[in-house]
Image (tube, rainbow, N blue to C red):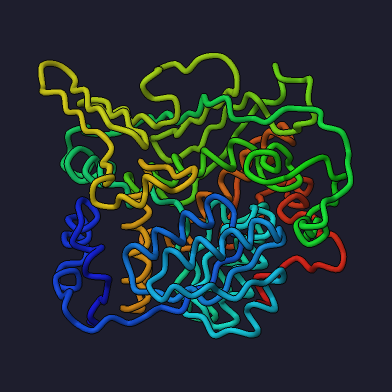
Amino acid sequence: MNTFNINRRSFLHGATAALALSTFGAQGMDLMNPAKTWRVGLIGTGWYGKSDLFRLIQVAPVEVIALCDVDKNQLNEAGKLVSQRQKSGKTPKLYGDYQKMLAENEMDIVLIGSPDHWHALQMIDAVKAGAHVYVQKPISVDVLEGEAMVAAARKYKKVVQVGTQRKSTPHLIDAKKNIVDAGLLGKISHVEMCCYYHMRANGNPPVEAVPEYLDYEKWTGPAPLRPYDGSPHVRWWRTFMEYGNGITGDMCVHMFDTVRWMLKLGWPKKITSTGGIYVQKEGKSNISDTQSAIFEYDGLNCVWQHRTWGTPNNPDYPWSFTLYGEKGTLWASTMAYDFIPQGKGEKIHKDVVYEKEKYPEDLKEDKIELNAAPATRLHMLDFLSAIENNGRPVADIEEGHISTASCILANLSMKTGRSIVYDPIKREIVGDREANALLARSYRAPYKHPDYKHV
């Protein structure tokens, strides 16, 4: 086993250290060996792209050599912030074209924080260029993109970690080990997952001229070219199906992926979904404001529900999952978990772990999710460990594909009005020609949809 080299100062801090030590064993203990410096690039320097990069800088010796973004203002700001964060103090090379960045630099790792409609092409091109990849969730906007991404990772023998960092969230790791795996729930025969955040952007901004600092043509890439009606960054692009898969694709993927990890579930046997725009009809948004989905397994249904209006069914768990077992119930979210036993047993509560004192720089970071920072740090350590040992990370691309594709298939069920049975071996929807035609979206010329047979 190779020695897992990490930044000693960062590693010795808090929950990240404790969990890494328990997860990586001897690797985590051997902190004194000379550290390898990882050559890193980032595609997409917006909110979460920078957040992922800064978490990596905190736990490993890296040299960020290149950044890419089609927004010059965002790119230049990121360059300055990275120069302040990384040990060398150097400003990375700045690019507006990610393919040029990949061609001109040899990188060990590429982080992808671009919008969903760009993930597939960028991940595939990055592994072809010789880099290991950390790609944000959901991995793709259609099912066959995901199949091609898995095929590329395997063909080029690269580690691809997906940003479903709930699997590296300290209190959820604890819940899996000490509640689920310990048998406190008994047989689990029903799961509920939900998101009741009012997160659906829904305005009617006018069409306007594209600002000179933004290459809107490149931003749009393989997606349909919508008339420019303001900055697409952060929430606006997510409110259109042209670029993603709505709240189900954005938020269900996290909860469903966590449930599958906890319960060791693979592909669902059948997926059924209904919903639409029931309440918020006044704006341009074309994603559902109300949706239910059932992911069926033998003797178990995983049920998803989102509403971007009204109140949550449990104010303490507005974005969460609930495991119902014969011996008790587990409520869990990014913020806490509660185990409620059947009968007289002892209730167990655990809160999210913060590391504000250990990483004071977190407090100065714009828009940081402080509750997610420890999870992302541990997720990065797991990613690096998989690279060092030629293994699979906890959020391997194949697992990310199953979770992402299942959410996409739920949307296809809602669109067609029929249940979906997906055959992952044949890569087709069983007995439904119309639904099969929706497994791959049309790409805008000159972009070519990736093919899992020829990556």
Residue 255 drawn above or below residue 276: below
Task: Residue 196: give x, y in percent of width and height.
Answer: 52, 24
Residue 69 shown left or right of residue 52 in the figure: right
Between 76 and 48, the residue placed more toward the observer is 76
Task: Residue 366: give x, y in percent of width and height.
Answer: 49, 45
Residue 140 drawn above or below residue 205: below
Q: Residue at x 79, y 68 (%)?
A: 448
Task: Residue 68: give x, y in percent of width and height.
Answer: 63, 67
Q: Residue at x 49, y 65 (%)?
A: 82
Residue 157 drawn above or below residue 207: below
Q: Residue at x 82, y 51 (%)?
A: 211
Residue 387 drawn above or below residue 288: below
Q: Residue at x 15, y 67 (%)?
A: 25
Task: Residue 266: give x, y in percent of width and height.
Answer: 43, 51
Tell me the quadrant of the picture where the N terminus can be found. bottom left
Between 322 and 24, the residue placed more toward the observer is 24
**Tally of marks:** 0
Between 91 and 5, the residue placed more toward the observer is 91
Tell me the quadrant of the picture where the C terminus can be found. bottom right
Residue 265 shown left or right of residue 223 in the figure: left
Would you identify the image quadrant in which residue 100 lies?
bottom right
Between 12 and 257, the residue placed more toward the observer is 12
Residue 438 shown left or right of residue 63 in the figure: right
